[in-house]
Every structure is written in structure tokens, then in C-alpha cells.
Image: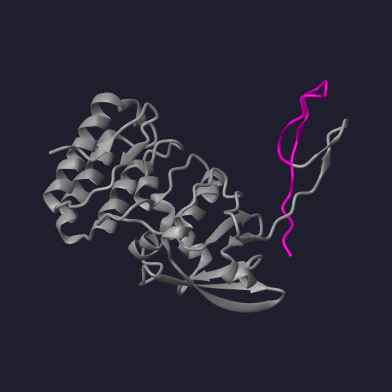
Amino acid sequence: MIKKIIFSVMLCAYLLPVNSQTATDWQSDLRYLQQTVHSKYNNLFYNISASDWDKAVDDLYKQVPALNKEQVLAGFIRLLALFHIGHTQMNTFGLHQGSTTLHLSRMPYGLYCFNDGVYILTAAPEYEKAVGGKVLKIGSMKIGDAMEAVRPLVSYENEQGFKANCVFYLAIPEFLKAQGITDSESQTAVTYLKNGKEETTVFKAGGNNNIFSMTGLETPAGWAVAKKPVMYHCGKRNLPHSGICSTCPKQKHYTFVIVLP
């Protein structure tokens, strides 16, 4: 059979859309992943030993027949996250496109971790009232517990890396269900605090929410957003976003901040 797993030089594994995948197919791909890691990427074993990683592979291999396809996918993602190397991860963006039997949707909100908690930074226009709210619960799970529930899926090297990336998994309903955070892949209730009042909004998943974001700060066209750029004077001129001012002798960095209502 043609393997569904391919690798780039960074060991970013791309799972290609599949129209049919049996338990035996998944197990075959799992062994292919294992063999490829050992033969081409054995320098990955410095946060986890090869024997411990192989044990995790064997455990998933045995579980596959009893799992649904989303749970198997989550299992593959967990295996690569065990290396705890930021760019070593399963790239699932292709599964947000088209109609296949293995398809991921996304919730119509964007979350962001600040020092004092997780906030709804952006949302589709019909959910604008929730924008700027501090998340208290996703489904029936407290936000801190929900973050811990997706931790095994997140590839990260430090806690800041985890906080930056966990919010993407908290917006994918298939993973919310696979990790026991919600019991539905079609909608998710989010409880948040805004203007001193606790409220709950039920967000409905959809394919039109599938955007790619490098930082979590990008806003889809038409979405409501709880941020505004604040000009930062680098010494020569006012600049509206992050980067380096080429006109400054010392090449000073400048930035913007996010202001929540």
C-alpha cells in the first residue's frame, strides 16, 4: 500500500487525506513511522529514550482496532509530540480541506494565552459578543484542565511554546472530543468572563473556519477581533507592528500590544 506518512527534513509529518483506512492500514503506517524515525531521525531521542518511545508505539499499535479514526490520528500526533521538539510534529492542515472520511473542522473562535489566562481573541461575526472574554471552561472542563488534556498533542520545548500552541488544539472539535473535553464534534460550549459577568456561548464547528495562523494573532477576514495596534516609537518614527526598524542605527526592535476591552 502507499504510505500515508511522509517526512520533510524537519520531520514535520504530513498526513495526506485518505478516503478509506482500515485498522490494518493504520498499523502498517505506524510501523512505517517507527522504522523511518529509527533509520533517518534517530537523533531525536534526547528528551525520550528510544525504548520508551517504541513502547508508546507498541501501545498505540495494540489500541488501534478499538479506536475511531480521530482517536488514531490523535495517537500519531502524541507520538511525535513525545520528542518535545517544537518543529517535530504532525501537520494536519491538509485534513481541513476537501471532503474525506478523515476530516478536521475548526471552531469559529481564536484563543490566545496571556499572563492572566486564556482569552477569546477573535471570533466569527455571529459570536462577536464573546470576543474579549476570559475563558473559564470549554465544554464542562475548566480551561486549565482543558489545556492539560491537549498537552500530550502539543509539540513544544518549553512552557511558553506549549501555551502558544495549545490554543490551536483547543479550537479543533475532533481533538476536543478525542481528549475528553467535549462530547460533540459539531458544537462546543465556551464559558467566559466579560465585563464582570459570566456567560456561555455555544460555538458551532464548520469548514469555513479553517484558517492557517503562524502566531494565533492573525484574524480571518470578517471576524471580530479584540485587539488594536498601539504605535511604539523606536526613536525615529512610529511603527504599527512588530519587526525591526531598518532606519535605526541600532536596528531596534519594535512591537505592538493587544488591548482587550
Query: Residue 95 appears at what percent x and percent y?
Result: 34, 50
Q: Position of residue 243 (x, y in %)?
A: 70, 34
Which quadrant holds residue 11?
A: top left
| Residue 120 location (% of width, % of height) | 60, 63
- In the orientation shown, which residue stands out farthest toward the top? 249
Instruction: Name the one closer to the observer, 239 or 40.
Output: 239
In depth, the one of 213 and 97 nearer the eye is 97
Majority SS type along the magenta span: loop
Residue shown at 37%/35% (left/top)?
12
Q: Is residue 90 magenta?
A: no
Q: Tally the marks.
A: 0
Image spot of residue 87 (x, y percent): 44, 36
At x 48% / y 53%, what residue is drawn?
A: 168
52 or 221: nearer the eye?
221
Residue drawn at x 23%, y 25% is 39
Colour pattern: one colour
Q: Quadrant of residue 69?
A: bottom left
Q: Does residue 128 appear left or right of residue 29 in this picture?
A: right
Rendered view: 220 above or below 253: below
For the magenta stretch, what is the residue range?
241-261
In magenta stretch: residue 254: yes
Question: In the picture provided, is 135 more to the left or to the right than 102?
Answer: right
The residue shown at (36%, 46%) is 94
Quarter of the image for the C terminus: give it.
Answer: bottom right
Q: Quadrant of the N terminus?
A: top left
The answer to which quarter of the image holds residue 112 is: bottom right
Q: Is residue 233 above or below residue 197?
A: above
